[in-house]
């Protein structure tokens, strides 16, 4: 009997040991399945699986793994969609970890800072070489950012201006860690406009100050010394006041015209019409100003195609260009108004040329800038505002054309502008 009990006890112990071993193996396999995020499929012959508790556990675990897999797929797809959208954003977007290793960079960031190449895995310090940016990040790390977060970056001969902001986000690589999300908003155009505005205000102030000072000075003299001034001197002073008042009027009118053109509030009445008639009319307007030995020549092709243009505005362009010849090259002998068709660009090229003293080569690239004068002293004496050619440029550009200047100092000057031609199917009005 004792031997029987011993054998029974030994068999039971062995059976329990094997069951425990199988259960441990089953738990280990189940653990591996969970880590691998796959369903657990035990062998049907396993007796241990027949336990209801284990069956329920395996079933619940498989359901959990399946739900987690579906969530992960959805989350991965959603993350890729967000990453694709962020890459398409026009701003500079960069996500980097605590070691400043880049986890994500938008396409704009790669174009500006890394010649379009991928920045992922690179350090911010080496790929975004900007001292101002690194100083900004140092302030951000030390929680010492002030209100001014604007910084500049020089690249390929161009200066970019950005408004920077940075915040903490969950890491892309390791969700349990935090990364930094850097956003650089491009304000380069705003900076350029601000510089232009300051220069414009300074130039306008200077241009207005001169005639106003002259008017004020001579006006005070006429009032205070009216009885003591000879009649001839009074007339001379009054003439000075009148001339500078006229100069002031012309300047204000040009400023208003330029302002309307630059703000694009002006509406142009583009009508299909030939240029011949307008060129002839403008030439006739200036015949009375010709001196002995001077002439105006019209060099216009007979087969010149029609052009859609605003007659008043193009008349203004021609007036400005021809008036400049009379003002700055009064010693010319021949002033040529030309127009020909350029087949390569499908444009009509108009030009005003003279055989006057010419313009220095270093001044040609600045002719169409506001308030730019080749000879500042002589220009003011002759009544120029320095805005005429800038107005010309804006009018032509609003006709989808271009302007250019050529000159040989001491020989000739030629100012040209282009106008897009009419399509052959469009009607021409005389």
Image: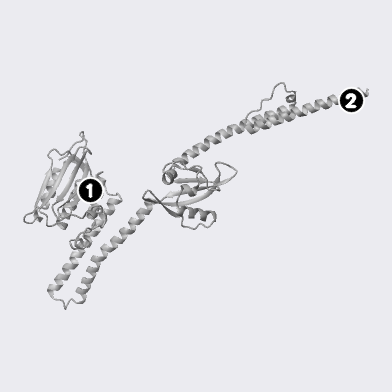
Few, some or many C-alpha atoms within 10 Å of disc 1 (few <14, some 14-19, many ≥20)? some
Mark 2 or mark 1: whose residue is earlier in sequence: 2
User: Could one spot residue 278 in this view of the protein?
Assistant: no
Q: Describe residue 53's horizontal placement relative to residue 138 as left or right.
A: right
**Where, by quadrant of the figure, is residue 349 drawn?**
top left
List the single residue furthest toward the front: 126
What's the CA distance linking mark 2 and mark 1? 115 Å
Dot 1: element = strand
On residue 6, the disc is 2
Measured as percent of width and height from the top left, residue 156 is found at: 37, 48
On residue 103, the disc is none
List the single residue furthest toward the bottom: 228
List the residue tagged with mark 1.
Answer: 404
Identity of the residue drawn at 26% across and 65% down: 209
Measured as percent of width and height from the top left, residue 200 is found at: 30, 58
Measured as percent of width and height from the top left, residue 89 is found at: 44, 42
User: Could one spot residue 213 in this view of the protein?
Assistant: yes
Q: Nearer the viewer, mark 2 or mark 1?
A: 2
List the single residue furthest toward the right: 1
- In the rendered view of the protein, which quadrant contains the N terminus? top right
Q: Is residue 236 above or below residue 228?
A: above
Measured as percent of width and height from the top left, residue 325 is found at: 15, 54
Identity of the residue drawn at 24% across and 66% down: 210
Q: Describe residue 138's horizontal placement relative to residue 230 as left or right.
A: right
Dot 2: element = helix
**Where, by quadrant of the figure, is residue 241 drawn?**
bottom left
Identity of the residue drawn at 25% across and 68% down: 213
Q: Is residue 242 above or below residue 361?
A: below
């Amino acid at each position: 009997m004792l031997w029987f009990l011993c054998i029974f006890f030994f068999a039971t112990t062995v059976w329990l040991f094997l069951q425990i071993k199988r259960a441990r193996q089953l738990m280990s396999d189940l653990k591996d399945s969970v880590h691998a995020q796959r369903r657990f499929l035990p062998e049907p012959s396993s007796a241990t699986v027949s336990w209801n508790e284990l069956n329920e556990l395996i079933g619940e675990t498989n359901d959990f793994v399946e739900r987690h897999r579906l969530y992960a797929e959805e989350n991965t797809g959603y993350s890729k969609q967000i990453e694709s959208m962020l890459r398409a954003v026009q701003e500079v977007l960069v996500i980097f970890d605590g070691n400043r290793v880049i986890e994500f960079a938008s396409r704009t960031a790669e174009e500006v800072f890394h010649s379009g190449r991928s920045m992922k895995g690179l350090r911010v310090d080496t790929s975004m070489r900007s001292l101002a940016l690194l100083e900004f990040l140092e302030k951000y790390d030390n929680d010492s950012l002030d209100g001014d977060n604007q910084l500049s970056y020089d690249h390929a001969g161009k200066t970019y201006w950005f408004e920077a902001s940075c915040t903490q986000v969950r890491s892309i690589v390791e969700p349990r860690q935090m990364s930094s999300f850097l956003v650089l908003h491009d304000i380069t155009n705003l900076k350029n406009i601000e510089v232009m505005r300051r220069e414009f205000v300074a130039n306008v102030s200077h241009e207005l100050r001169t005639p106003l000072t002259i008017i004020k000075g001579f006006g005070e003299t006429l009032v205070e010394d009216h009885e003591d001034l000879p009649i001839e001197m009074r007339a001379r002073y009054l003439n000075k006041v009148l001339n500078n008042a006229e100069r002031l009027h012309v300047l204000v009118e040009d400023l208003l015209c330029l302002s309307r053109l630059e703000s694009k509030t002006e509406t142009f009445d583009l009508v299909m019409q030939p240029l011949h008639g307008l060129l002839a009319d403008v030439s006739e307007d200036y015949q009375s100003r010709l001196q002995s030995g001077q002439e105006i020549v019209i060099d216009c092709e007979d087969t010149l195609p029609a052009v859609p243009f605003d007659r008043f505005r193009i008349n203004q362009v021609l007036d400005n260009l021809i008036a400049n010849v009379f003002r700055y090259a009064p010693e010319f002998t021949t002033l040529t108004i030309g127009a020909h068709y350029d087949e390569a660009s499908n444009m009509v090229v108009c030009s005003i040329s003279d055989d006057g003293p010419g313009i220095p080569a270093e001044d040609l690239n600045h002719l169409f800038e506001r308030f730019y004068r080749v000879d500042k002293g002589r220009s003011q004496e002759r009544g120029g505002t320095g805005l005429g050619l800038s107005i010309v440029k804006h009018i032509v550009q609003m006709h989808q054309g271009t302007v250019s200047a050529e000159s040989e100092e001491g020989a000739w000057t030629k100012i040209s502008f282009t106008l897009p031609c009419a399509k052959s199917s469009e009607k021409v009005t005389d």
